[in-house]
Structure formats: C-alpha cells, structure tokens
Image: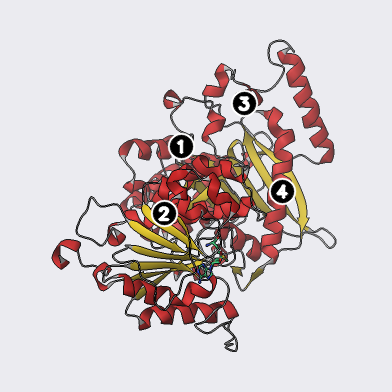
C-alpha cells in the first residue's frame, strides 16, 4: 500500500491564503512598503524593472523561500481530468502561455556541460518534497538500510533521483520516502527514472499521467520563446507528485553574472513571475465539500502576490475549462495538427520575428478597406515561411547557379504585400493581379515596378524558368497552379494556399459525406498537383487564418537527391 502524502508543513511548503488571508497579504505588502520607507523603495524591485532604474536585488536570484497559495477555486473536474490537463500543459504550454512558441522535452545528458550544471542546480531536491515535519522525523527504516537502497538505486542508473544528497545526512528523509513507497515504487521502474525524459511520442501520448504508476516524476522541458529579446529559450523542470496531486514548474534561471537585465526579463512574457509555481488538485471531501484547484508560487517578492493573484485566477480558469474538455483522457485543446513541418521551425520563428518588426508599421499605414492586422501579419507570416522553406537545402533554388536569386511569381497577388515583403527580402519576383490596389503606389518604386495588372489566362500563361509559382488564396487560379508551374519549366515548383472553393470550370461544389468541404477541396487541389507530375507536400501554417494549409509542389529532385548528382 502506498500511503498518501501528508499535507504541507506549517513552517515550510505552502502558506494558504483564503480571502481574509489574501487581504492580510495585501496588508503585508503595504507594510513591507512602509517598512522599506517611501523614499528608499516605494515600489517593489520587479515593478522598478521597467522604469529604467532596477535596483541591485533585481540582478540576484533570491532564495526559493516559502510557497504561497495564490488562488483556490472549486472545481467539478475529476483528478483524472486534472492529470490529463497537466500532461497536455507540460507538452503544449503554448496553449496557455502565449509567449511560448513550443516546448520540447530535453534530456539533461544531451545538454552542453554548463547548461547541464545549471539545470541540475535548479532541479527540485528531495528535501523540497511536500512533506511535513512529522514525516521527516518519523522513521522506521534504519539508516544503513536506506543507504544500501541508495546504492542500489545508483546501480540501477537512478542516481538522478537522488541528486547531491549526502546519504548519512538525509537518511531520515529517505527513510520516509522509502517507507511511504515513493522511492520504492520509483526504483521498480528501473532505467526509466532518468533525470529527464524526452516527451512522449504520439503513440506514447496514449499513456497519460493519470495512468502512470510513477509517484514522482521529473521532466526537463525547454520552452522556446516567441520573443527572443532576452533569451531564445527557458529550461524548466516539471516535477509531479502523484500522491500529493501536485505539479511544480521550476524555471532554470540563467547565471546572474551573464545578465544584462533584471532577472524578471529572463522569464517570458506572461510566465508566472516566480522561482517556482505549482498546481494542486484537492479531491472532494465530506458530502458538500467540493474538489478544489489551487495554484501556488515561490514569489520573487511577496509584494507581487496582488498581481499574481489575477494570473493564478486566470490560469486556474483555463485549467478548469481545459479539464472539462477532456474525454477519454484526450483534451480537445490537444494539438491535432502538426505545424510548420517542412521548415526548420527555429528558422521560421526567427524570420517571422524579424520580419514582423520590420513590416508591422504597414498595419498603421494601410490604405485599403481590408483589415490591416490580418493582412499584414498573415502575409508576413507567409513570407517568413517561404524564406525558411527556401533556405532549407531541400528547397533551394533548383537551378545549378547557386548565386542566382530565387525567383517567384505571385498570381492573384491582390494587395501585393507578399510581393513587397519578398522583394524587400531580396528575392526576384512579380506580383500579378487583374485589379490594381491603392496600396501598390505606396510601396516605393522597387516593389511598384514588380506589380503587374493583368488578367491571367491560366490555360496559356507561362513564366519561363521561374523558381516558384505562388498562389496565396488565389481564387479561380488555385487549381491551375500545378499546370502553370509545369509549363514554366522542369525545375519550377509551386506553393499554394487554397482558400475559396474553385475548380477548373467554376465553383467547386463536390461534397463527400463525413468530410468537411475544406478537406474535400484540399484533396482535389492535391490531386491537381500529382496529376501534373508533382510530389505534393502539405503543411499547416501558423497564420491567423482558418484556411492555413499550404501545398508545396516538388520535383523528384527534391526527394532526397542532391543538386550536384542531378546536374
Ligand atoms: C482572395 S484574393 C487574394 C489576394 C491576395 N493573394 C491575398 O491573399 O491577399 C484573390 C485575388 O486573385 C485575383 N485574381 C483572380 N483571378 C485572376 C486572374 N484570372 N487574373 C489575375 N488576377 C486574378 C483577384 O483579383 C484577387 O485579387
């Protein structure tokens, strides 16, 4: 039998705050400010961070301190749903933390030495387990026995579970861990107890935390940031205490000696500003006592509790909503499609970030009646995707002249913004549309000279030798893209984002039972490509549009063969 973990201790672990206690915390905040003296520190260090005069403390990692209960709310989700949400949260935090691009599991042994040391330094230690004082002292296991078990653990490759602990010193804690079954159960899982683990693959996804027998699990994950101003990623330990129904998220903070800015700026935007944050599920008790969700944090500064309270409320709301969406262990928040699979995701992310900063001003200077936010960011995203695609070896210019600029023709270019961005990025191309737009005259001569008014005849048009034929939501031209690309030359490829449903004669009206019209249309456009001799690859783009699937029509040479051998 595995006894359940006792509640957190009174002098370490959590400091629960109910409504009354919350107001005391507020009072404490005010008192802290008063004690500091208005003139000396009227606002907290992390608030000062953005004022341009951060205090010295803002450049130091404060001690972990006590865990503070930030928020608690009643819930009707089950423990099983809670673990499913946490499982998804660990794998896909981008659904919650919008500043995160994606997360990936990291094996600590694969990290460069310096990063490995840093990560180990921040890894939650066994003495941080949510035990109370009694459990530390009540031991029926004697020390040598525990030491022997520790040695066995090391022999099993499990020393990652017992980091830097001096066996003699920590004997009692260990004894309790073994006694309560926490380590024993863990040791039985032999080598699986590495100090970090790769995220599960699609097949393994079927096994949720709920069905996992591991009582304590550490996972090191890397959060890739969307904004890369301070650092491109943040490593974070996710530690699950199955019996305590609790999960800790502990960021691996960079070495302060390398900081150029206060510590807070190394945490992504809207990441809980704490040294550690955690969630807990409290099951329903006696009749009428409902289950609860709780969020805790080890705050940088107790004064931030006021602001963290609202973050916690928001996150617990998400957790609750997410939990309600779970059926059979799978949440509908789970990513169902893989995005950006044909490009190097890091490359795309950096390109998109860079381009957004360069071209976002157009959202303010937009003379068209269409929504500038949508168009500017969507077309910029597509341009960034194309650049990442063209940079990848597989899709380099298909000509043997490596120095030659990649050339393109954007058919049905509309406002011409994609043509403008690609031109500014140094590509050689044209945008063609049967209808001129006001904005064309604002782009400047370099782009303007490449925008052409022409009613394209898709049955005969040809752009000899062009590298890429682009059809971005190109309406009636969409199904014609493959045949136009074939006509242009043996190395021409195409990139099409199908949108409105058109076939060769007019509106595309085919319907297939049990299939969305969009899916049927995508299959039709794909067939248009394969019938013209292209290998059609498909990708889902990270653009603000519901029609975000792109097809890339490739030549056989793209399929693994190197340019040289073909030449
Ligand atoms: C839905 S709009 C898309 C515009 C642009 N690509 C975008 O994503 O913002 C389709 C465009 O294709 C153009 N178009 C459709 N058939 C055309 C043809 N035969 N010749 C030239 N342009 C055409 C239309 O004028 C329209 O601007």
Q: What residue is pinned by disc 1?
A: 231
Secondary element at tag 1:
loop
Decide if residue 50 is on the left or right side of residue 19.
left
Lower position in the chain sequence, tag 2 or tag 3: 3
| Above/below status of 232 relative to 536 | above
Q: Is mark 4 within 8 Å of ligand 1?
A: no
State which quarter of the image contains the N terminus: bottom right
Residue at the spot of label 4 = 314
Residue 58 x, y percent position in the rendering:
56, 23
User: In what element is the residue under mark 4?
Assistant: helix
Secondary structure, mark 2, is: helix
Question: Sequence-wise, which precedes: disc 4 or disc 1?
Answer: 1
In the rendered structure, which disc, 3 or 4, sits on the residue that comes first in sequence? 3
Q: Which residue is mark 3?
A: 50
Q: CA distance from mark 3 to mark 4?
A: 23 Å
Q: State whether label 1 is within 8 Å of ligand 1.
A: no
Please report whichever mark, 2 or 1, sits nearer to the chain's N-terminal start.
1
Disc 2 from disc 3: Cα separation:
31 Å
Which element type, helix, strand or loop, lies under badge 3?
helix
Alpha-carbon distance for marks 4 and 1?
A: 26 Å
Closest to the camera, between mark 2 and mark 4, is 2
Residue at x 43%, y 36% (from the top left corner): 121
Does the residue tagged 3 have its C-beta within 8 Å of any atom of ligand 1? no
Return the x and y of residue 50 as percentages of the image width and height: 62, 26
Q: Earlier in the sequence, mark 2 or mark 4?
A: 4
Q: Are marks 2 and 3 in contact (CB under 8 Å)?
A: no
Q: CA distance from mark 1 to mark 3?
A: 17 Å
């Amino acid at each position: 039998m595995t006894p359940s973990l006792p509640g957190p201790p009174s002098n370490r672990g959590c400091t629960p705050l109910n409504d009354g206690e919350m107001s005391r915390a507020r009072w404490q905040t005010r008192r802290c400010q008063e004690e500091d003296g208005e003139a000396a520190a009227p606002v907290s260090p992390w608030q000062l961070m953005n004022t341009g005069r951060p205090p010295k403390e803002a450049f130091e990692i404060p001690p972990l301190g006590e865990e503070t209960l930030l928020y608690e709310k009643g819930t009707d989700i089950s423990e099983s749903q809670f673990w499913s949400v946490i499982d998804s949260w660990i794998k896909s935090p981008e659904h919650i933390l919008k500043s995160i691009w994606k997360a990936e599991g990291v094996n600590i042994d694969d990290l460069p030495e310096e990063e490995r040391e840093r990560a180990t330094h921040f890894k939650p230690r066994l003495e941080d387990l949510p035990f109370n004082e009694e459990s530390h002292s009540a031991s029926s296991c004697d020390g040598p026995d525990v030491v022997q078990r520790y040695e066995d653990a090391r022999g099993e490759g499990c020393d990652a579970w017992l980091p830097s602990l001096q066996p003699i010193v920590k004997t009692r804690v260990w004894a309790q861990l073994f006694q309560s079954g926490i380590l024993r159960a863990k040791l039985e899982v032999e080598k699986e107890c590495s100090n970090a683990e790769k995220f599960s693959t699609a097949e393994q996804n079927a096994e949720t935390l709920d069905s996992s027998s591991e009582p304590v699990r550490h996972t090191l994950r890397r959060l890739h940031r969307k904004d890369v101003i301070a650092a491109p990623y943040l490593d974070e330990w996710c530690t699950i205490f199955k019996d305590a129904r609790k999960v800790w998220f502990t960021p691996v903070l960079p070495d302060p000696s390398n900081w150029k800015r206060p510590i807070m700026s190394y945490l992504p935007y809207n990441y809980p500003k704490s040294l550690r944050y955690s969630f807990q599920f409290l099951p329903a008790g006696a009749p009428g006592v409902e289950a609860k969700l709780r969020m805790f944090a080890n705050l940088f500064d107790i004064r931030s509790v006021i602001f963290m309270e609202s973050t916690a409320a928001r996150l617990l709301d998400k957790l609750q909503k997410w939990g309600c969406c779970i059926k059979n262990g799978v949440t509908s928040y789970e990513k169902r499609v893989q995005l950006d699979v044909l490009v190097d995701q890091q490359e795309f992310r950096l390109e998109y970030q860079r381009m957004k900063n360069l071209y976002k001003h157009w959202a303010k200077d937009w003379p068209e009646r269409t929504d500038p936010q949508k168009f500017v960011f969507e077309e910029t995203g597509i341009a960034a995707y194309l650049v990442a695609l063209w940079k990848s070896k597989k899709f380099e210019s298909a000509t043997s002249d490596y120095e030659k600029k990649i050339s393109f023709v954007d058919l049905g270019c509309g406002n011409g913004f994609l043509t403008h961005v690609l031109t500014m990025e140094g590509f050689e191309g044209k945008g063609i549309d049967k209808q001129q737009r006001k904005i064309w005259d604002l782009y400047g001569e370099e782009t303007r000279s490449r925008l052409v008014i022409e009613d394209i005849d898709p049955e005969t048009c040809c752009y000899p030798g062009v590298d890429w034929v682009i059809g971005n939501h190109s309406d009636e031209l969409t199904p014609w893209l493959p045949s136009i690309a074939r006509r242009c030359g043996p190395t021409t490829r195409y990139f099409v984002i199908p949108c409105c449903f058109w076939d060769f004669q007019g509106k595309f009206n085919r319907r297939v039972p049990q299939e969305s019209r969009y899916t049927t249309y995508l299959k039709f456009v794909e067939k248009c490509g394969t019938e013209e001799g292209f290998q059609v690859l498909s990708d889902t783009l990270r653009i603000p549009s519901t029609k975000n699937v792109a097809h890339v029509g490739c030549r056989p040479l793209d399929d693994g063969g190197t340019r040289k051998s073909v030449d």
